[in-house]
Amino acid sequence: MEMRLQKFLSMCGLGSRRACERLIAGGRVKVNGSTVMEPGTRVTDGDSVSLDDKLVMPLERYYYVLNKPPGTLCVDRDSRGRTYVVDLIPGAREQGCFPVGRLDLDTTGLILITNDGELSNRIAHPRYNITKTYRAVVTGTVLDRDIKGMERGVALEDGSFVRDIMVLSIKRHPKGREVLLSIHEGRRHIVKRLFLALGGRVVELERTGIGGLRTEGFRVGRWKRLDADKLRKAIGMDR
């Protein structure tokens, strides 16, 4: 079977296709002994592919969902020795797993952990309309009508515009308001930036859902392995 080199590397558990493109551009990948720096290069089953002179092969696919605790990182580097989310799942690092997208250090809730870069790309990209649901506790002078008005779209500080926001509930909270909302976006700090644009500040944030996956009955810090077909159905990718 013929495919693009970055897709093949992603199937080897080396990250998303975009991350694998960076590996190629960095001159770290060889095909049949020759360095290749063009991501669009096509490879077949008979080709030998190596990263840093080590042969790589497609891996068995693993899919986990983790209820991320606060204080854990979604990047595998930290000078202060804080915990990488993948290391909360025994053996996941050795399986080549990585988190799909990121949650901030202080944010809790659902995050998918996998070594399937192709699936990761589809879940993270907004064009596939995978809904992410968040519970945010917001302080500041933001009013209920302003929060409900988010459904018309929100202009961020960088001039970009976020659409397809659904406000599911607004409740009073000792710190301000507790808001449940769903979005398709996955940009960095996106929920915090949405409320900042309204004059509010998020002081607690939990991702409560990804597609049909929910945190109900799933304690913080716990994880479970998922079947690929059930995962695709749960997040609406089987249509």
Image: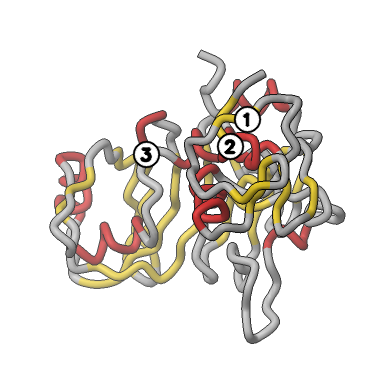
Q: Is residue 164 visible?
A: yes
Nearer mark to the viewer, of 2 and 3: 2
Vertical position of residue 18 compared to residue 7: above or below: below
The residue lying at 81 percent from left, 34 percent from top is 60
The residue lying at 70 percent from left, 43 percent from top is 115
Q: Amino acid at mark 2?
A: Leu
User: Answer yes or no: do the residues labelled 1 and 2 have beta carbons within 8 Å?
Assistant: yes
Q: CA distance from mark 1 to mark 2?
A: 6 Å
Q: In front here: 147 or 56? A: 56
Q: Amino acid at mark 1?
A: Val
| Quarter of the rendering containing residue 8 | top right
Nearer mark to the viewer, of 1 and 3: 1
Q: In front here: 73 or 97? A: 97
Q: CA distance from mark 1 to mark 3?
A: 33 Å
Mark sitting earlier along the chain (1/2): 2
Horizontal and vertical percent position of residue 223: 75, 49
The secondary element bearing badge 1 is classed as: strand
The secondary element bearing badge 2 is classed as: helix
Q: Which residue is mark 1?
A: 43
Q: Amino acid at mark 3?
A: His
Vertical position of residue 156 compared to residue 226: above or below: below
Using the image, tell me which numbered label, if any, was put on residue 184: 3
Q: Quadrant of the N terminus?
A: top right
Q: CA distance from mark 2 to mark 3?
A: 28 Å
